[in-house]
Image (spheres, grey):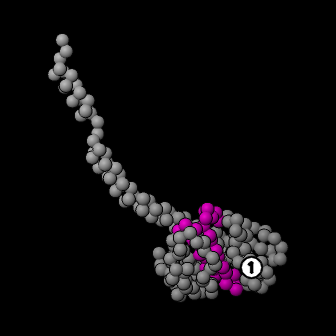
Amino acid sequence: MIDLKHIMRTQRDKKEKGFTLIELMIVVAIIGILAAIAIPQFAAYRVRAFNSAAESDLRNGKLSQEALFADFQQYGSTVAAANTAGAAGAGGGVLLTASGFVATVDNPGPPVEEVGVGISTNVTLASDIDAADASFVSQASHLQGDREFAMDSDGTPLYWGAKTEGVAMAAMSVVPTATVDDVAAGAASEGGAFFVL
């Protein structure tokens, strides 16, 4: 004999095992809210990481500059004119190459010594020297970062200024002079003033 009560109970149990549409909509809404909070935070973390790469490369560049000065009594420059006689001082200057090496220049011959700098991907590092090759200013920024960093050999602080994300640093905005912290003296970054980090 067929037990109708048993059949009705098993059909009712089958209906109660799934999720309702309202339950699914609540879960989707919660996931959407969490994603709306997490995605902007993730983007901010990425920008901070890009800025940290530029800051780190600038600090490493300063160490390489000091090593170069200790060995050769001259700082390096990314300015091509440093290779020409008299353009970067009486000795013809030194050159910081785009490949990430500080090289002394035996004017007018090729580089004879190198010091590794190691520049991160998408980071622009620029350095310029004064007329006597005795002082330098360096600036760095990451292509996807929102800050530009600068330092002067005549001062100890590291400075930062605003920069447009996705735009490479076009040119150095600070001109070095001996015995003056040129960045602290009111130099401007791409997006305004420089501030002490």
Q: Tell me the element at label 1.
A: helix
Asked if the magenta segment contains residue 179, the reply would be no
* Towards the viewer: 179 or 57: 57
Q: With 165 as the anchor, is 11 left or right in this view?
A: left
Report the side of 35 relative to 107 (left or right).
Answer: left
How crowded pointer 1 is (Cα within 10 Å; few <14, some 14-19, many 20+) is rated as many
**Is residue 38 left or right of 130 when viewed as pictured?**
left
Query: Of residues 85 and 21, which is closer to you in this image?
Result: 21
In-front residue for pair 15/136: 15
**Residue 50 on image: x %, y %:** 53, 64
Residue at 58% x, 82% y: name it: 154
In magenta segment, residue 140: yes
| Magenta-tinted stretch | 117-145
State the residue at coordinates (62%, 84%): 176
Q: Position of residue 74 (x, y in %)?
A: 70, 77
Left or right: residue 24 compared with residue 188: left
Write down the quadrant of residue 122 in the picture. Answer: bottom right
Residue 72 visible, this orientation: no
Residue under the image location 53 percent in, 74 percent down:
164
Q: Which residue is depicted at the point 70% across and 68% down?
A: 98
Residue at the disc numbered 1: 82
Residue 99, given in percent of the width and then of the height, sits at 70, 65
